[in-house]
Amino acid sequence: MIKRRKTSTVTAGNVKIGLKYPIVIQSMVKVPTTDISACIKQINALAATGAKLVRVAIPAKPDSIAFARIVQKVKIPLIADIHFSAERAIEAIEAGAAKIRLNPGNIKDRNDINRIIDCAKAHKIAIRLGINEASIRNLLRDTAQRQRTDLMIKEMAGYIRLFENRGFNNMVLSVKSSDVIRTIESNRAIAKKFDYPIHLGLTHAGLAQDAIIPASIALGTLLWQGIGDTIRISIAGEPVQEVEIAKKILEPLGLFKSNEPQLVVCPTCGRVQWDLIKFAQQTKKLLAEIHKPIRVAVMGCIVNGPGEAADADIAVCAAADKGFIYKKGKKIAIVKQKNLFAVLKAEIKKIDC
Ligand code: SF4
């Protein structure tokens, strides 16, 4: 079992972030904030998929105005994504943001930062203090990895001091890079130095097919080391997919318990005597309609079939023109291939969770 790192607890609306609470899955709205109905639709879809917090970009005044209306119409707490402008931050907080994401490095005036802190304190909201490697690129140019991490930590320590000196502690930290190794190293360094919760993400990761593996390596490594209290998988694609991938990263680490079925399929090899992939796809489609935490295995032969069946609620193990059906590891039927799917379907429906 993973031993999560000790942290303070941060409150963002009705969501608690930190050691004592489940890891919070986040995503971000990907339509213009001023398109209020599209935003609400996306936020609701994200919430239905499992996001507990959703971030909304507030680049200009009309976005703050739209944000105020969106906040009223959705059920989950929202994070306002702020860059460059104290006015946008204050407008978003006053509109009802539960948290703002702020990179103090792009708000140059200290008085502006102080105004944001005071407003956040008055409204009891949370702030994510985020450093993006890209935003301090000049500082990091030509710098060796070790020194880069030190510089990012120094930058973060300076921001934290600024907030703490004004009596603000409801903070989540993040250091983001598009590089897997740098993401791991810089997050390990901040985890060692500070005890605020950490938001994990691999930024600018790419299209889903390119982003999933690097994000899984970076975030999986950190989570396995007990680091990370909220996560977002950044992909150039549908936001709902970000939440689905996040769940897939957390689940095998024991950090997320799904209520959905799990399908195990053998990779197939020369021993398979019928179209097992097609059968597995058919089963996957069936399971998408069944909202029970069951484990189903579809195996191509008796080499690993019975072993895998032992760990499954229900399993099919293929033979030449028939299949063996197992329930909780016990063989319950031998069925002709043409009837196999119908029998499997009936057995899955019988399982009571
Ligand atoms: S279970 Fe059988 S068919 Fe599937 S990969 Fe293993 S040996 Fe091959």
Image: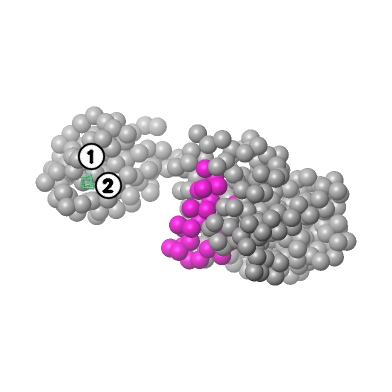
Closer to the camera in the image, 190 or 316: 190
- Looking at the image, residue 79 lies above or below residue 66: above
Q: Which mark is on residue 266?
A: 2
Residue 222 in magenta? Answer: yes
Q: How is the image coloured?
A: one colour
Give the CA separation, mark 1 to mark 2: 8 Å
User: Which residue appears farthest toward the right when viewing the image?
Assistant: 111
Q: Where are the magenta residues, as a range?
A: 198-224
Badge 1 vs badge 2, beta-carbon distance below 8 Å: yes
Residue, x 48% and y 66% (percent of image)?
207
- Does the beta carbon at disc 2 come under 8 Å from ligand 1? yes
The kind of residue on which mark 2 rests is: Cys
Q: Is residue 225 left or right of residue 301?
A: right
Main secondary structure along the magenta-highlighted residues: helix
- Looking at the image, residue 256 lies above or below residue 235: above
Q: Which mark is on residue 193?
A: none
Residue, x 65% and y 37% (percent of image)?
6
Q: Which residue is mark 1?
A: 305
Quick check: can you spot residue 161?
yes
Res. 210 image quadrant = bottom left
